[in-house]
Image: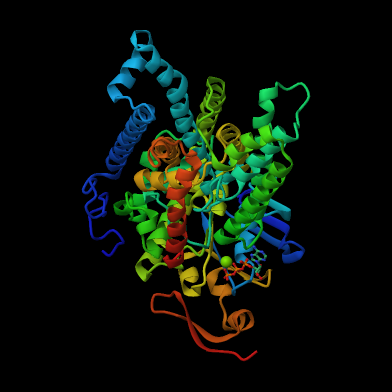
Amino acid sequence: MNAASGLDIAGLSVGYGTRRIIDKLDLGGISASSVTALVGPNAAGKTTLLRALAGLIPSRGSIRLDGRELAGLDAVSYAREVAYMPQTLPPRVALSVFEATLSALQSSPTAQDVDPKQKSLDVLQRLGIAGLAMRGLDELSGGQRQLAALAQCLVREPRVLLLDEPTSALDIHHQLTVMKLAGEVARERGIIVIVVLHDIALAARWCDRIVVLSQGHIVTDGAPAQAITPGMLAEVYGVEARVERCSRGFVQVMVDRALAD
Amino acid sequence: MTGLSSQAPPGQSLRPGAASAGMPPIEAYARRQRRRLALLAGLLAIMLAGMLVDIATGPSGLSIGAVLHTLMDPAAADAGIRVIVWEVRLPAALMAVLVGAALALAGAEMQTILNNPMASPFTLGVSSASAFGAALSIVLGLAIPGLPANWNLPLFAFLLAFGSVLLLQGLARLRGTGVETLVLFGIAMVFTFNALVALIQFVASQEALQQLVFWSMGSLARATWAKLGVLAAVLVVMVPLALRDSWQMTALRLGEDRARSFGIALGRLRFASLLRVSVLTGTSVAFVGTIGFIGLVAPHIARLLVGEDHRFYLPASVLTGAGLMSLASVGSKLIVPGTLLPVGIITSLIGIPFFVALILSRRGSLG
Ligand SMILES: Nc1ncnc2c1ncn2[C@@H]1O[C@H](COP(=O)(O)OP(=O)(O)OP(=O)(O)O)[C@@H](O)[C@H]1O
Ligand SMILES: [Mg+2]
């Protein structure tokens, strides 16, 4: 792997109005075929960082994909490289899951997809929601809508997939489906997946790398076993917690109590 | 295995009673598209029927047969009937259809672009702004040098419409602005521009005043072939342009961030759409005055019929608006026998209960 491959963020500053949320953040070497978890407390700036990476809010600094600066790209080219799944669920509109997925593909003028319908169906099938294809978004449960939202990103086949809490509305079964799929997609297509999660055990189990963000700064960055420690949990989240390995060797986090601050 | 679709084998619709149950999604989708096309054809048929009834209705009642006969073969028809049909009723009936179509398209686009189910040219004050522009042009004789005289009126109506639409968009983009805030702002615009029009009426000459009164109520009585030509041309340009953006507008229904990350240049999409809204509203108001609620009601009916895939939703809105205006025009001749009421009064009478119901139902919903 040469130095120019993957995603490199350097000196990135993002804010709203005059308020700086992220200040000169450096995050390098996010390599292809990998899944990176972005964790941290509420209001740490995770969503802000992802939206900046997706080109949805202005930022200063550099975001390079394979050595190429993303900032100069027009909307269509940017969207071909990067897809973003917002933290909020899609609204209840009178569109079927299939139509919504199709519109994600058809709304970029240069999308030259031979068979958008088949492609949309394939994604729904992979997510196990082909049975919902003809149902309207206005008649689905929260979790079903979250899966539909994921389908809209996957169908675009981006090179960087940014998922903002994609499992927040899902049951334990579907949490696994989604995390497993994220890993499979990363490796099959050689893409970069960055996923914001609040479930640290889930992040540890399914991600290659964990980046801990707190108050707009990176506190820890590394493999799950190194990144997740009782010390980090106390410092970042203000909780007393044990980090142990289960019989299968996966990291488990047991939160005992909140620390008084 | 547990799955969200575990009630049915993969690839099957779960919609209870859906015609597509048990069909592979792509086939079910194709079938639904065909059903929507059939619905559009049905709406077109209703619109044409409405037009025929509209032409047949009036002080000297004509049979549908006589109307058809005169339309098909004017030379063979009775001279009196020919004059009534071709010079009085047909222009008014066509104007009803074109204005209904234009206002409905404007309303449908506004509801999507502003993400507001209560948006329409009338409810958010765009029509009032146009009427003010028209009033300025008539009474104060404001004119762009070098422009043909009869273009000034639509131009001023358009300019004011565009200004008001830009204001609305600016407000809609301010952070924390909900659906209701925009509607309140729209109502403020309605009052402001109506007051300004009243002010102009106060200083207007007798002749100009009479012309102005028509605007405040909306009337089809002054349709001419020249005006029809302009409005038809506007629609011929605007409908395809709107349809060209239909996938993007569909995707915008999924939320702004999502739409932008699908590669949609939202600023351009918004600007183009609001420009279309201004032209459609401006020309409609310039020719027939303010007609309320068609632009609000028609998109809602269309949405119920064909959903929000804008390739179907926009045409369905257009056809529904055209049909509704035809019916309103018939109503305007029948309600008080022997009197032609301004059609704007009819659409408001029907539209206001609908608007209130919409507000009340929103309060009860989960959002
Ligand atoms: N649109 C906005 N305008 C102004 N400030 C904002 C906006 N969105 C977020 N913020 C502020 O930016 C900071 C970071 O918010 P952000 O949404 O990035 O947090 P987060 O890490 O995603 O939190 P959560 O886990 O709750 O989703 C917060 O202090 C928040 O108040
Ligand atoms: Mg967030």
Which quadrant of the render holds ligand 1? Answer: bottom right
Q: Where is residue A33 in the image (x, y as percent from the top left)?
A: 51, 53
Of the pair A122 and B281, the residue shown nearer to us? B281
Of the pair B310 and A66, the residue shown nearer to us? B310
Side of B117 where A28 appears, left or right: right
- In this picture the colour scheme is rainbow
Residue shown at 38% from the left, 51% from the top: A97
Residue shown at 59% from the left, 32% from the top: B283
In the image, residue B304 sits, relative to residue B210, either above or below, namely below
The quarter of the rendered structure image containing the C terminus of chain A is bottom right
Residue shown at 60% from the left, 50% from the top: A1
Residue B287 found in image quarter: top right
Q: For the view shown, which residue lies furthest in the bottom direction?
A: A260
Q: Where is residue B120 in the image (x, y as percent from the top left)?
A: 53, 47
**Residue A56 visible in rendering:** no
Q: For the view shown, which residue lies furthest in the top direction?
A: B75
Q: Position of residue A122 (x, y in %)?
A: 36, 46
Q: Position of residue B273 (x, y in %)?
A: 58, 39
Residue B182 found in image quarter: bottom right
Of the pair A19 and B313, the residue shown nearer to us? B313
Residue shown at 33% from the left, 38% from the top: B36
Side of B41 where B115 appears, left or right: right
